[in-house]
Amino acid sequence: MVKTKIAVLVSGGGTNLQALREGVLTDGEIVLVISSNDSAYALTRAAQAGVPAVVCSRKALGSQAAFEAAISQALSDHGVELLVLAGFMSILS
C-alpha cells in the first residue's frame, strides 16, 4: 500500500507530532516536520525519529511572502500530499 506523504507544522514541544507518530496514522507517513521556531523541542523529536525537519521563521526570512515560499518549497521538495498543523503558531494566508 502506498502511504500518503504528510508534513507536520509545529512551533513548540511536539506532543501532537509525537501522538501522530505513535500509531494514529495508518495510511500516512510523516516525511517532513516544519517548525516556525528554531528552538522547538519538536525538532528534537523529529531528529530522534529520523524524520527530516526544517525551520522556516518569518522573522528570519523577513516577510510573510518569503516565509510562505520557504514552506511551500520544503513541502514540494519532499513530495508532501497532506499538511497537518499541530500547534503551529504562525498565520498562513
Image (cartoon, helix red, strand yellow):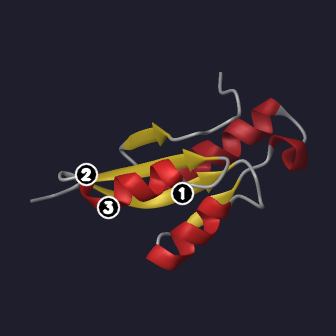
- Mark 2 burial class by Cα count in 10 Å: few <14, some 14-19, many 20+: some
Q: In the rendered structure, which amino acid carries the disc numbered 1? A: Val
Task: Return the residue at label 3.
Answer: 22
Residue at label 2? 25
Q: Disc 2 to disc 3, how far (Cα)? A: 8 Å
| Residue 83 % position (x, y) | 44, 40
- Foreground label between 3 and 1: 3
Q: Is residue 81 left or right of residue 4?
A: right
Q: Residues within 10 Å of mark 3 (few under 14, many from 20)?
A: few
At a point 56% along the width and 46% down the height, the residue shown is 9
Give how far across and how far down residue 38 sits, in percent. 77, 59
Q: Amino acid at mark 2?
A: Leu
Residue wearing tag 1: 33
Q: Could you say which disc has been placed on residue 71 in the image?
A: none
Looking at the picture, tell me which residue is in the foreground, 54 or 15. 15
Residue 27, compared with residue 1, is above or below; it is: above
> Regarding mark 2 in the picture, which secondary structure is present there?
loop
Could you tell me which secondary element the residue under label 1 belongs to?
strand
* Disc number lying in front (2 or 1): 2
Which of marks 1 and 2 precedes in the sequence?
A: 2
Asked whether the viewer can see residue 79, the reply is no
As rendered, which of 89 and 77 lies closer to the eye? 89
Residue 25: x percent and y percent? Answer: 25, 51
Q: Is the C-beta separation of discs 2 and 1 under 8 Å? A: no
- The percent coordinates of residue 71 (x first, y second) are 63, 45
Q: Please, what secondary structure does the residue beneath circle 3 have?
A: helix
- The residue that appears at 62% across and 55% down in the rendered structure is 13
The Cα atoms of the two marked residues, 3 and 1, are separated by 15 Å
Is residue 60 in view from this perspective?
yes
> Which image quadrant: the C terminus?
top right
Q: Residue furthest top?
A: 93
